[in-house]
Image: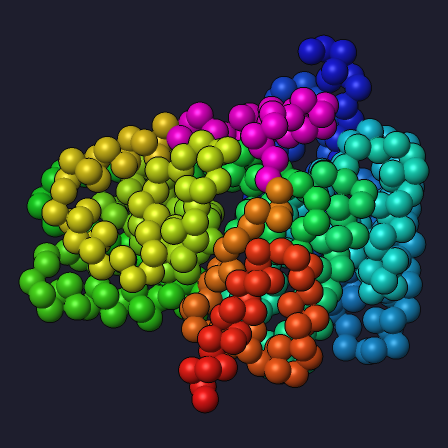
Amino acid sequence: MGENMKEHRIFLGAQEIAGMMKRVNNAFKDMGYKCDYYCLNEYVFDKNGYEPLPQMKKYRRHMERIQNTNSLLKKALLYIVQMFDILNIFVYTLFVYTDYIYIFGNGLFYFNPYLRHIQELEFYILKLCHKNMIMWLCGSDSRPSYCDVNTYKTINAMYRDARRRAKNIRMLEKYMLLIDNPASSHFHTKPYIIYNCIGIIADENEKVKANLQNDGKIRILHALSHLKGKGTAEIQKVLQELKEEGYKFEYIAVHGVSHREVLKQMAQADIVIDQLYSDTPMAGFATEAAINGIPVIVGGYYADYYHKVKSNPDIPTLYCAPDKLKENIIFLINNENIRTEISEKEKNYIESNCTPEKVAKKLIKLLEKDIPTEWYFNPFDNDYPFGGGIKKEEMIDNVTRLIDKYGEKALCLDKNTILFEKYMDLYRGNKRHVR
């Protein structure tokens, strides 16, 4: 193991998503690996916790100047300077690191408008230099635009974005191993690593659950961070119906407050409702609740498909179809023993699969090509069309309008796949309904 540590010199970046890179970097360091974490984006949740590496200080300084000027000419000139900052960082990494773990579909070149158009060159050079590369995708960077939470002003913009995402996925899989969620693997053409086999990283600092005296009052928490994507209006409608039907509980809605305040409110909760249209049983907020042993309800159309993928540990949140939300809330309100059982299972799952050290060890297995067969998913087995953060009806409308304007090619899918046939069936069914 000592020799392997010397062999692995790990680059992490080039941005931050929900603190994942920072936590993995710290875990690698604790395990004795040489590694560094490069954050080129403005990560709002960690502005005070990230100290840029010396080789990044010029880049950060020039980015601040770009953000603080309104002159288009000055911005353009500063972007030229910033381009050389990124190229200097890239050349430096070539001499220092043997392994690259990227996140969210982007490399270093993405963070400059002139280099972004030649992003593939970055990965081509790394492959030419025999670097080991992993891209950790997070769903919203790979999921097709027509079944994604993002709101596009025009059907043209949706079509352009679908093509961009498909092109990027297919470029990435030429150069590196990808990690992704089977529910969003529409554009993949090669087997990749199932996201949940690696695990979303839990942070020990998010343990806040208090030992409250049981006053007999059930407290239900929901965070209003993305009203449409989380289905907040529908969740609140169901909770109001339950109030009117005589169920006794206190509803805690958190919005526009600090992360620390969210955790403080979470400490008072008996049940957490994460979202209604999730294509994963445990995203970031659900993980925070789970690490505190609070039973989580997650809604999503993928709940009817999820258990077909048997290769990852079962995630013990209460994952249900959107139309089953109400009955599952009632089930948890009426069954304290079930809440306790789910609570214990969630904590055990986090401790066994999602601590930074556990995740870091699994990433090392990927770097060393010591990968269990069951961690792989063949994208041609994906038969889930409904996406994430979006109602089924809205997704079908998107697909109908896209095909009406651009034809079948608008789906950016292989015509021989299960998904292509599913979308065409939905399209034809919707056209008959409209007539």
Return the x and y of residue 149 as percentages of the image width and height: 51, 66
Q: Which residues are magenta?
A: 349-377
- Name the foreground residue: 285 vs 189: 189
Q: Is residue 198 left or right of residue 352?
A: right
The image quadrant of residue 123 is top right
- Tell me if residue 207 is in the magenta stretch: no
Return the x and y of residue 416 as percentages of the image width and height: 66, 57
**Image quadrant in which the C terminus is located:** bottom left
**Image quadrant in which the N terminus is located:** top right
Return the x and y of residue 85 as percentages of the image width and height: 88, 52
Which residue: 23% across, 52% down? 328
Q: Is residue 76 above or below residue 219?
A: below
Count numbered badges in the picture. Answer: 0
- Name the foreground residue: 267 vs 347: 347
Q: Is residue 10 visible?
A: yes
Dominant SS type (magenta): helix
Q: Is residue 268 left or right of residue 21?
A: left
The image quadrant of residue 347 is top left
Q: Is residue 327 above or below residue 291?
A: below
Q: Is residue 102 above or below residue 234?
A: above
Return the x and y of residue 229 as percentages of the image width and height: 45, 65
Q: Is residue 354 visible?
A: no
Which residue: 88% across, 32% down? 130
